[in-house]
Image (spheres, coloured by chain):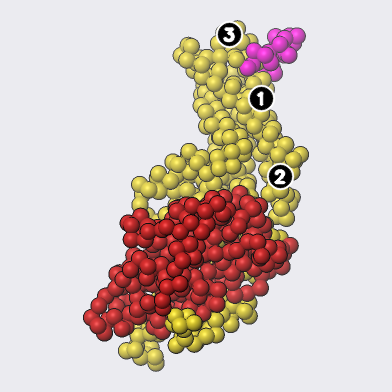
Chain colours: A red, B yellow
Amino acid sequence: MSDELKVPIMADLMAEGKKPEVLFWVGSAGSFDDRAKKITKAFVKILNKAEVDFAVLGTEESCTGDVAKRAGNEFLFQMQALMNIEVLNAYGVKKIVTCDPHSFNCLKNEYPELGGNYDVVHHTQFIQELIKSGRLKLKGNLYKGKRITFHDPCYLGRANNEYNAPREILKSTNASIVEMNRHKRNALCCGAGGAQMFKEPEKGDKDINVLRTEDALQTNPNIIATGCPYCNTMMTDGVKAKEKESEISVLDIAELIANSEEL
Amino acid sequence: MNYLPNIIFAILLIFGIGYFTKNVKKLIRNIKLGQDVDVSNNKKERFKNMMRIAFGQSKMVRRPIAGMLHAIVYVGFIVINIEVLEIIIDGLLGTHRAFSGIGVTYGVLIGIFEILAILVLVSVTLFWIRRNVIKIRRFWNKEMTSWPKNDANYILYFEMVLMTLFLIMNATDVAFQSMNNGNVISQFIAPWFSNLPEATLHIVERSAWWLHIVGILIFLNYLYFSKHLHILLAFPNTYYGSLKPKGQFNNLESVTKEVKLMMDPNADPFAAPADDTNDEMPAKFGASDVQDLNWVQLLNAYTCTECGRCTSSCPANLTGKKLSPRKIMMDTRDRLEEVGKNIDANKGEFKDDGKQLLGDYITHEELWACTTCNACVEECPVSINPLSIILDMRRYLVMEQSAAPTELNNMMSNIENNGAPWPYNQMDRLNWKNE
């Protein structure tokens, strides 16, 4: 295990007159949710390993407002967005990376109309770029021979057409990647999107995350890989509902890489 | 008296096309009841989308069996319509097979029509079997009762009859059969009629001819009342379809104005509204009825073919929840039709009928079941966006009525107070670093 995480804070760098290459937008889930915090840390380990010049906003970060917008509260969304944009613009942020496809979509597509123009990438795109450019060299063989299936997050896949970056990264772990019947643009939602994460589902025959987990189980995986903190929670719950948690782990792409490189 | 058939034909044609035009005008008026939205940008990309998706059927073939059968019926429809041109000329001028003078080419053309006609017959029959015998699930959802179910079958019967009439018309046309050119299918049907006296044969041929053209005129006028309207509207609908990433939900500028005012430290909270805003209509946030939706959303509703691909891929619907994106579109169209009839009955003015789209057609439960995953949008073969209607109605529920589920209200007040959907302090945002 490596030493402590290096997590530079934007305000500190600014005080030193420095400007980082990229801002890491941690997001509310990544900051507060116990499971998602592990993803945040795994990603920071990767950033440290690749010696990426980054910073976080820390206590200056606030909710993107994404979930309020999906719930129909455009007022709350715009208030959050305008406040965040003020902070981001004050720091002259150019490039943002985030582990949450919902923040990614919102910052990338919905902030520009309110005056926030940034080059926003999802962490899977960022990691793929690090691998491609040689800044991150993968040597680990932890997942060789393991069966991994990737669950496409709606807000990365269908919403923004990114299907390859996570798969390319998975390929470089030497695992064997198995696709679910419903994948890429036909992928089934995990059930958490559109503010569903924060409420009980409407009445039905079963929960969406259970159905999605059944999709995943059909591929006989050792690992279900995700690229979204909400998908991660939903799939973890689904695996528990199917009492398979001792055989199958649900891991974010960042965690897979951090684990296999023993970061 | 010799001109009687020509006169009758002309009257039928004028009446058929006239009534259709009248309904098209009504259609356009109804669509224009929607809010204005600027879709005049990127003409080139829009045209490309239309050619690819509507003309080229690129999204239909994602489900290969239905896609292939549909492509046959579609090509058949377009190509065989060239024959209708000849029928119209013959009907008006009293000629018989006006184009036959072009020789071998005519035979080739009619040969193609005949082959397509038989392929269309087979495809339409298979469609009927899929619907009524195999009972494919998406054709039997809750919303597919009475009219929607019958409408689909009527269309199939119509096409069966029209194609059969076309082939009978050719098979009983003695002159055409003796040309022995282009009768690739009808030559096998001709023997069925070989025992009939020549006069009867002629009557059969004329009857098939008349029924064929009358059938086409009836079908044309049936469109307005049917999901079959998609054969026309798929083109504008794909042209005006969204060019933005699917995750990008539209920005409400009316809200931006207010939020900016709220956040402006220099704004005087007690100031009277500026003069230029006085005569503006009071803004309504979100949509509770069809007039609050924009005209592209209303065009979407008229374009919907009720194929149910959206519903069959909707995660909420797949897990037994009440939401069906197809029903959202059907409800929108039904309500819009109702509003249109109300306007017609009240001399061009809408009189409040105590109903609206929200509540009377679409329930809160349906709206809150949506995960905004875009599966329905991705699936639609003609670029319909049920999600945008769901979102606009959620906006109305939240911003006008504060009618969100309690848990969502909690989530939203957490964001307001702590800058996170959970009740944690913003000052703790970096705690993960040292945990």
Q: Residue at 68% of width from left, 34% of height from top? A: B126
- Between A140 and B64, the one lying in front of the other is A140
The circle on residue B165 is 1
- Between B163 and A74, the one lying in front of the other is A74
Q: Judge depth for marks 1 and 3 and give the one in front.
A: 3
The circle on residue B180 is 3
Q: Quadrant of residue A124?
A: bottom left
**Secondary structure under badge 3?**
loop
Callout 1 and callout 3 share a chain: yes
Q: Magenta stretch?
A: B185-205
Q: Are marks 1 and 3 in contact (CB under 8 Å)?
A: no
User: Counting residues from the N terminus, which is met first, the one under dot 2 or under dot 3?
Assistant: 2
Magenta-colored stretch includes residue B198: yes
User: Residue B247 appears at what percent x and percent y?
Assistant: 47, 62
Q: Mark 1 to mark 3: distance in Å?
A: 20 Å
Dot 3 amino acid type: Asn
Query: In this picture, is B37 found above or below A22?
Result: above
Q: Residue at 62% of width from left, 27% of height from top? A: B119
**Secondary structure under badge 1?**
helix
Q: Quadrant of residue A80?
A: bottom left
10 Å neighbourhood of mark 2: few (<14), some, or many (≥20)?
A: few
Magenta-colored stretch includes residue B243: no
User: Residue B9 appears at what percent x and percent y?
Assistant: 58, 28
User: Residue B87 appears at what percent x and percent y?
Assistant: 55, 24
Q: Residue at 63% of width from left, 61% of height from top? A: A248
User: Counting residues from the N terminus, which is met first, the one under dot 1 or under dot 3?
Assistant: 1
Q: Judge depth for marks 2 and 1 and give the one in front.
A: 2
10 Å neighbourhood of mark 1: few (<14), some, or many (≥20)?
A: many
Dot 1 amino acid type: Leu
Chain for disc number 1: B
Q: Judge depth for marks 2 and 3 and give the one in front.
A: 2
Q: Which residue is mark 2?
A: B136
